[in-house]
Each structure stands twice: as structure tokens, then as C-alpha cells.
Image: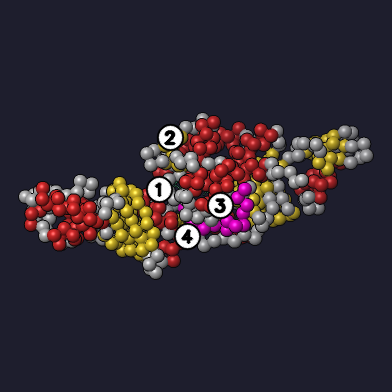
Amino acid sequence: MTRDIQFVILSVSEGSMFTRLFNQSYHSQRGVKHSLLFEGISLVRHRDGRYTAGMGARKAIAIIGGGAAGFFSAINAAQLAKNKGLSVDIRILEASGQVLKKVKISGGGRCNVTHHCFDVKTFCQNYPRGSRELLSPMQKFQAQDTVEWFKQAGVRLVAEADGRMFPDTNSSQTIIDCYLDLVKQFQIQLMTNSAVTAIEVLSPHQLKLKIRGKDSFTADAVLVATGSSPAGYRLAESLGHTITELAPSLFSFKIKDPLIAGLQGLSFSDATLKLTLPGKKTFKQTGPLLITHWGLSGPAILKLSAWAAREMKHAHYNGTLTVNWMGSEKSSDVENRLKLMKEENSKSYLKNVYPENLPKRFWLNLLDKLSIDRDKQWAKISNKDISKICHGLVATQLNILGQNRYKDEFVECGGVTLSEVDFKTMQSKVCPGLYFAGELLDVDGITGGFNFQHAWTTGWVAAQHMVSPPTPH
Ligand SMILES: Cc1cc2nc3c(=O)[nH]c(=O)nc-3n(C[C@H](O)[C@H](O)[C@H](O)COP(=O)(O)OP(=O)(O)OC[C@H]3O[C@@H](n4cnc5c(N)ncnc54)[C@H](O)[C@@H]3O)c2cc1C
């Protein structure tokens, strides 16, 4: 199977690097009768004097962003090209001097690579934005594939009780080393300190990248995987894409209340939260809760912040949080429990006998907040006080004063508008040859490995299509 060289030449603009090099190469090798090799394209001369390009046509793929999505896509593109016997020039262009910076600090230095949930529909329910669009790419490459991919690459991922999966070394460096080894093995060009400042469309599937302080470069396919960097959003906009409203996601709440004062570090394994924003919009979440120096955090709060990211931004991070510290226990059950406690411990002091799932320091703060004497005996507690304690346990109302980005994981909500991207290929519907993957898209997940899985999945799908798009009929 051969491709007509005229087609190749016509597909790049006159005066492009390709045309200049072709002419140079052609003139310097005029003596060659049957074929010549130009930049990886084998040109076959026919009897009628025409040249055609052989199977070895070398495709150029540029990956903008040396982060999670960029690396995964580049490596998979190289793997696929190798399997198909295709010659592909793949470059990763990274603005800073260091690649995979977020992978390094992720999961507290352990890298929560993915989540142990292999049912695609259930998995996708963990994305406040993008859950519907991710269904198709996840059918092709999901968490189970990630586990297998890493196994093939020599990295074993282990699940924790809550479903989060980490490398068995418990070190993000394992993931980084794995990627750097593969980049070397596949001879992918890694260009650091190479910020892409502009992309010019020469013709469909011919995109010229301007790189700060370096020569420009023309590619057949360009993947923008710039995470939440403003420069990446500007590149997408310059090519006709729109960026949805940006807002932080995965943050903790600033709360000042005597109930939690001085209790930083205390955690509750299962709390029920209800967030009420001005205008009465509500969000609910259950899960582990952590008291911090500045308020409340932990998985339940981070998840709530993700579901309500845009609404909380509009509310200037003010609202009311109603907490059931007893998990999902109903008010009537808690009240009965307290009454039984009174019956069975009538001679004991309040400060010494309390529901077993509560930390003592929290119980004492609660009594103080409700102005109930902790040195009273249970026998002397009125039913009214029992109701007050019960209300404090299942429906404490706390005022949210602001947000705080927790050190463990945060992402940006918002990005490239999803309807402008074909999720079967991750190709732009606006600019042929342009692809997107990772956090730059208007997709974000809750905490637990879902954000990396989105980066792996979209990077993988883009790689398949960039290397070998289906041949048009
Ligand atoms: C502290 C922290 C911990 C986290 N922990 C986890 C976790 O354990 N599990 C999880 O699932 N998620 C975690 N996340 C989220 C996860 O890191 C991101 O979702 C993920 O890194 C997104 O990958 P990406 O490739 O889209 O973007 P990034 O990883 O941010 O990579 C983008 C890259 O593009 C480069 N770039 C930007 N503009 C340009 C340009 N113009 N030219 C060239 N290069 C450019 C940037 O320098 C950067 O290196 C964490 C996030 C943070 C901040």
C-alpha cells in the first residue's frame, strides 16, 4: 500500500519545513533510481517519474504538558506505534524544568493511582463534571486496565479498604521511574523548559507549535495536556474552544466554632453532612470527617466541596453545614440511647460516660457549648437536656466562613467545554488534529484516585487515535 507523495506535499503549506527538506533531499539524491529515504518517509520512484511515499511515513505527534495525562498518552502512543510497526516522532513539551510534578506530590507522596472499582457506570458516578462523557472512553480503558497496564510495566497496585489504589512501594517515585524508563525505552523526546506559547493551524492536521526560546515545530497531531495551567486554557481558546467557568474543587471548609475549638486531629469515621447554601440549595454527603486547625476536612468534606464547587464559589464560600456526628443514626435512636445511658449510669458523671463512638474531648466541648454542667450526674439530667444533647449530636449547625485548599489533593473544576470534544477519540470537534486529555477538560472527580484515572483514560484514548486514526473510506 502506498500513498501518493503529491497528497503529502499538498497537505502542508508551501514553504513549510517538509517542502523545503523534501526539495533539498530530492535534489541531493537525484542519482538514486528507485527510492530514497527522506526524514523517515521512504519515497518510491515509479516508471512514469512520480514519487510515492511508502509504509514508513513518519508521523509527528506533539504532547504539550509533561504531567500525568501527557506522559501516559505519549507512552501509549509509542507502544501502539511499535506494535503496528509505524515510525512516529513523539515529543513531550514541558514548560517547566521538572516533569510529573503533581504525580510526585500526589496522595501525600504515595500517588493514589486509581480506585478499586471495575464497574464503569459506578466508577463514572464519581465525577461531578464529566460523568456522562467519560462513559465511552472508560469502556475502552478503565481502572482495571490501569492495574493491568502497571502490572505489565512491573508496578503492582494495591487497594486499601476505602478503595484507593497505590503502588505497593507506597511511593509516587515508583510511578515516575516507571514512566521515565518507558520514555527512554521508546525514545520519546522529552523537552523540558519548552513552554508552548501558540499553536498555528497550517492546514487540517498540520499544527505549528511556537515554543518559548526554541525553534517552532510542526506536528500532525497535537495533544494539549496542560492541566489547570492558564496557558493551556489560552491555547485552547486561541483555536476556537470555550472554557467553562473555573472554580476550585476538593477543598476544606473554614469554620470557627467552640464545638471544634482545640480539637484539631480528631476524626470521625462516619459522619453525615448537609450543606445549605444561600437560596436554600442543599448537598449531602457521608464519610470520614477530620477536625483541623482551620475547620473541617477529610473525605466527606472534600467530596462535598467537589459536588458543590461552582455553587460554593457563587456563594463566596459561605453557607451552613449541618453535621450528624453519629453517622446515619436517627435522632429518635440517639435520644433513646441517651435515655438508656441515664438509666444505666445514674450515679456517673456526665463527663465520664458518653456514647462510645465519640472522642471524649469532643463530648466535653459539646456539653460546654450547650451550657450543660459536665460535673452533673446523669440522674440529674432533665429530658430537655437530653433532647438538647441529642440535637447537638445529630444536627449541629456550623457556619462556613471560607475555603482552604487541603494539602492532599485539589483540582480545578471547569475547562474545555465537553461538547466541543469527541470523547470517542479525544479529538477537538473544532480543530482537526488537536486533542485534549486530563484536567484541562471540564471534568473533575472526587478524591480517591478518580482524577488520575481520568488523565490515564483520556490520554490513552487520544494516543490510539493520534497514532492510527481510522482510514477514511
Ligand atoms: C497536592 C495534590 C495531590 C494530588 N493527589 C492526587 C491523587 O493522589 N490521586 C488523584 O487521582 N489525583 C490527585 N491529584 C490530582 C492530579 O494530580 C491531577 O488531576 C492530575 O495531575 C492532572 O493531570 P494533567 O496531566 O491533566 O495535569 P498536570 O499533571 O498538572 O500536568 C500538566 C503539565 O503541563 C505543563 N504545562 C502547562 N502549560 C504548558 C505549556 N504552555 N507548555 C508546556 N507545558 C505546559 C505543566 O507544567 C504541567 O507539568 C492531586 C493534586 C494535587 C495538587
Which residues make up the magenta segment? 411-424
Name the residue carrying label 2.
Answer: 158
Name the residue carrying label 4.
Answer: 247
Question: Is residue 354 visible in this depiction of the protein?
Answer: yes
Q: Residue at x 85, y 34 (%)?
A: 35
How far apart are the two marked residues, 3 and 1, measured between alpha carbons? 26 Å
Of pointers 4 and 1, the one earlier in the residue sequence: 4
Name the residue carrying label 3.
Answer: 133
Q: Residue at x 43, y 38 (%)?
A: 166
Depth-wise, is mark 3 or mark 2 nearer the camera?
A: 3
Residue type indicated by callout 4: Ala
From the viewer's side, name the closer residue of 397 and 47: 397
Of pointers 3 and 1, the one earlier in the residue sequence: 3
Name the residue carrying label 1.
Answer: 408
Q: Is the residue marked 1 within 8 Å of ligand 1, measured from its CB?
A: yes
Residue ranking furthest to the bottom: 279
Q: Is mark 1 on a helix, strand or loop?
A: loop
**Magenta span contains residue 416:** yes
Of pointers 3 and 2, the one earlier in the residue sequence: 3
Of pointers 3 and 4, the one earlier in the residue sequence: 3
> Is mark 4 in CB contact (under 8 Å) with mark 1?
no
> Is mark 3 in CB contact (under 8 Å) with mark 1?
no
Q: Which residue is drawn at 31% across and 63% down?
A: 399
From the viewer's side, name the closer residue of 332 and 86: 332
Say left or right for 131 vs 296: right
Question: Is residue 228 visible in this depiction of the protein?
Answer: no
Depth-wise, is mark 4 or mark 1 nearer the camera?
A: 4
Coloring applied to the structure: secondary structure
